[in-house]
Amino acid sequence: MHPRISLHQIVFDAGSSLASNLADCRQIGFSSVGLIDQRLLAHQPAEVARLVSAHDLRVASMTCTPLFAPGDPDRWSEAERKLLTAIDLATAVRSPLVYGCTGSAGNLTWSEAAAVVAQRCPPVLQRSRTVDVSVLVEPTLPTYADISFVSSLRDCLDISRETGLGINLDIWHVWAERDLEHAIRAASPFITHCQIADFRIGNRTMLEKIVPGDGGIPLKQILGWLLEAGYEGVFEIEIHGPTVSEEGRIDAAQRAGDVVGTLLDELGA
């Protein structure tokens, strides 16, 4: 498996154990894994670190959503505590970053929600910089307005410039944006993580992330733009949904790794 590829834990059934997830990830051939903070609640940080080490894996990312919940003042303190806990967990398992969605804007305008995020950032970034764990925000389609008000890479860039947060470039969410090549170049100083899946053109009934190469996203072109912009980080496979389950999660993950690895080899990564 290409050394710059990671597999996100979401590919595995939510009811499966962390130990089995890590074992399957390693058996497929991945050397890095992305973990979800809410799937680790049954484990102490030291135990998670021990299991990761026992399976000879690196943790490429830690997911925590929502990061700030700007549209719900009653949840601001809760979201901050949760994010600080995720940063501490990332530190324990040696993940270089925590990423997630901002949280809904609720009844706020976009600018008002962005101002709340900027207001809530300082204690979080102070902790993250102390332990050398980056905090990243990711763009999502407007369909996900219940968990994020940041719906484009340009939105992400505005937030990053204002706050110092990094960017997780989830290609599945941004691939159809206008002039994406230019947006990637502009955002490149902030992009420190990248996630990959494919989209089946015409699918309007299910927001699912399918195996790269099975859909219509011009992945090679987009990955090329990202590499040309100087991206040196991990390419994390994040696939889930009925198509992946029908094929078999392990088989789909292995095929996804092979496809992305071939693309990266062809691009000289």
Image (cartoon, helix red, strand yellow):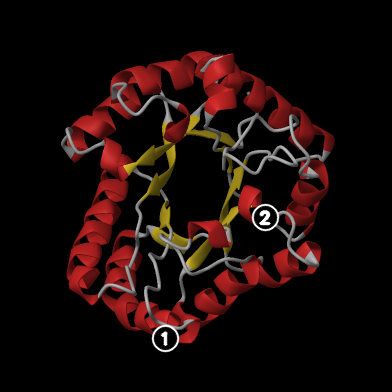
Residue 156 quadrant: bottom right
Q: Which residue is mark 2?
A: 231
Distance from disc 2 to disc 1, alpha carbons, whole Å, reads 31 Å
Which residue appears at 76% of the width and 44% of the height? 217
Position of residue 264 relative to residue 175, above or below, is above
- Residue 216 seen by the camera: yes
Q: Point out residue 138 in the picture as x, y percentages from the top left corner.
A: 51, 59
Graded by Cα atoms within 10 Å as few (under 14), some (14 to 19) or many (20 or more), the crowding at tag 2 reads many
Q: Which residue is mark 1?
A: 112
Position of residue 154 relative to residue 45, above or below, is below
- Residue 140 seen by the camera: no
Q: Point out residue 159 in the picture as x, y percentages from the top left corner.
A: 51, 76
Mark 1 or mark 2, which is nearer the start of the sequence?
Answer: 1
Which residue appears at 29% of the width and 69% of the height? 124
Q: Amino acid at mark 1?
A: Glu
Q: Amino acid at mark 2?
A: Tyr
User: Closer to us: mark 2 or mark 1?
Assistant: 1
Q: Which mark is residue 90?
A: none
